[in-house]
Image (cartoon, rainbow, N blue to C red):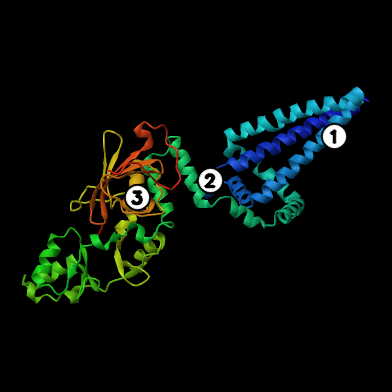
């Protein structure tokens, strides 16, 4: 009898150890950094290769671990119940329940998971060979369980996995998490986020609007064109003929100066249209990632943006796209005024043409970027009218005061966070506005 008790007790201890192994392994494999495992794999670490292989099929891995964990827990509980029944009779059921609950929670769950979360990569590398054997042995049973679960949920494994979170969202979440923890500075966060945002932005979001474009009239005297090109801070200028919407080429100032020198600085001998290259027109709905690839593929830095009717809306350059990643790029010819001027009282005076995205990046705000490109467009969208100077609106947790207006264009706005007005912490509001009182071309 004593031998049977000792054997049963030993079996329970072994099963609890196995349960701790499964619990710790699950936490280690899910918390281990895939980037770190990938780096170790490139260095030739064979265990890192095993971990990477296991991570490529997370459903099969987690399924096998859960099956093994539940098997040993149930078997340990059954053996403990039989042991306590033999020792204490019917009261042994209650004793066994209390004892096993305590042992499983402390030694088979909390302790191994706490240990694993503190050193996930090290533990994942240690348990990888054993887990590989367990996953292989339990693969048929795990697949059967997955099939039953998939049938009950009405979706395939791939659909369930894709519904959880996209890779870009996972990366963005990790970047924001490290930024809040102080491990990633704001500039690095903005640059990494800018790369992820390229697919979400269209050329219309970053282009130089046609009202801000500098262009040349091919019908002007050549000397006037030369003078205008020399005064311009840009190296590439679109050329139009007959009417301002009829763009017939793009003139590179370097080519113009080379020709100007060749003809002995006699501008009348220059054929402007012969020097201009054929314009490249791109749709306004092209996302920035595709446009960046197109720039690199064509070895071109300049394109004109057209809408669905073929009308020119503006222009976009390679530098405009790069600025979405690295921020404003300025040289000795650029005007450094960004149109964003913080005030001592916590408000910010903003030019109406400033993109909402630029304001968010400069001030670390979260104004919506999907309803309008510029800050003036955002105010008009929310107000559902063209405001007059002196009018004030509050939406999205910010107060917008119209400072200046030119014809139908809002040229200056004062933006103040609600918490800077002493109205308590920032609380996101519904998009519906509340009126308070009346009142880049590159080359």
State the mark number for residue 78: 1
Q: Residues within 10 Å of mark 2 (few under 14, many from 20)?
A: some
Please give left or right for residue 314 compared with residue 169 in the image.
Answer: left
- Which residue is outermost to the top? 88
State the mark number for residue 379: 3
Residue 170 drawn at (x, y percent):
52, 47
Which comes sooner in the sequence, label 1 or label 3?
Answer: 1
Residue 230, picture quadrant: bottom left
State the mark number for residue 99: none
What residue is shown at x 85% (from left), y 34% (from top)?
Answer: 78
- Helix, strand or loop for disc 2: helix
What residue is shown at x 90% (from left), y 22% (from top)?
Answer: 88
Please identify the quadrant where the C terminus is shown.
bottom left
Callouts 2 and 1 close, C-beta under 8 Å: no
Compute the Cα span from label 1 to label 3: 68 Å
Which comes sooner in the sequence, label 2 or label 1?
Answer: 2
Q: Is residue 441 above or below residue 367?
A: below
Closest to the observer: 95 or 20?
A: 95
Residue 57 drawn at (x, y percent):
64, 52
Compute the Cα span from label 3 to label 2: 51 Å
Mark nearest the camera among 3 and 2 is 3
Mark 2 = which residue?
A: 40
What residue is shown at x 11% (from left), y 75% (from top)?
Answer: 270
Q: Is residue 443 visible?
A: no
């Amino acid at each position: 009898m004593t031998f049977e008790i000792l054997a049963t007790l030993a079996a329970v201890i072994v099963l609890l150890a196995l349960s701790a192994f499964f619990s710790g392994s699950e936490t280690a494999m899910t918390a281990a950094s895939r980037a770190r495992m990938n780096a170790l794999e490139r260095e030739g670490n064979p265990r890192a290769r095993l971990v990477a292989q296991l991570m490529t099929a997370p459903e099969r891995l987690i399924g096998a671990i859960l099956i093994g964990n539940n098997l040993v827990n149930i078997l340990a509980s059954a053996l403990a119940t039989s042991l306590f029944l033999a020792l204490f009779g019917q009261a042994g059921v209650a004793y066994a329940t209390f004892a096993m609950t305590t042992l499983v929670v402390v030694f088979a769950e909390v302790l191994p998971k706490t240990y694993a979360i503190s050193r996930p990569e090290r533990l994942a590398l240690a348990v990888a060979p054993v887990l590989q054997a367990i996953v292989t042995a339990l693969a048929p049973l795990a697949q059967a369980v997955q099939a039953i679960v998939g049938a009950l949920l009405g979706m395939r494994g791939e659909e369930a996995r894709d519904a959880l979170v996209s890779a870009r969202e996972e990366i963005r979440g990790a970047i924001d998490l490290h930024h809040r923890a102080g491990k990633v500075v704001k500039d690095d966060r903005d640059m990494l986020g800018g790369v992820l945002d390229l697919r979400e932005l269209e050329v219309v979001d970053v282009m130089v609007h046609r009202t801000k474009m500098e262009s040349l009239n091919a019908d002007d005297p050549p000397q006037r064109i030369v003078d205008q090109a020399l005064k311009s801070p840009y190296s590439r200028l679109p050329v139009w003929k007959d009417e301002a919407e009829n763009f017939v080429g793009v003139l590179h100032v370097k080519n113009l100066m080379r020709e100007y020198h060749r003809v002995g600085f006699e501008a009348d001998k220059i054929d402007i249209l012969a020097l201009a290259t054929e314009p490249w027109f791109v749709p306004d709905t092209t996302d920035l990632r595709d446009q960046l690839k197109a720039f690199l593929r064509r070895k071109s830095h300049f394109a004109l943006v057209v809408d669905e009717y073929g009308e020119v809306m503006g222009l976009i350059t390679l530098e405009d796209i790069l600025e979405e990643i690295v921020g404003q790029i300025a040289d000795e010819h650029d005007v450094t005024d960004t149109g964003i001027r913080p005030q001592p009282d916590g408000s910010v005076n903003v030019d109406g043409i400033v993109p909402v995205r630029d304001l968010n990046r400069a001030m670390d705000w979260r104004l919506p970027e999907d309803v309008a490109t510029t800050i003036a467009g955002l105010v008009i969208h929310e107000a559902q009218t063209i405001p007059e100077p002196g009018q004030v609106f509050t939406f999205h947790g910010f107060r917008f005061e119209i400072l200046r207006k030119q014809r139908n264009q809002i040229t200056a706005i004062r933006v103040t966070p609600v918490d800077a007005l002493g109205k308590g912490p920032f609380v996101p509001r519904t998009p519906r506005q509340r009126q308070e009182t009346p009142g880049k071309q590159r080359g």
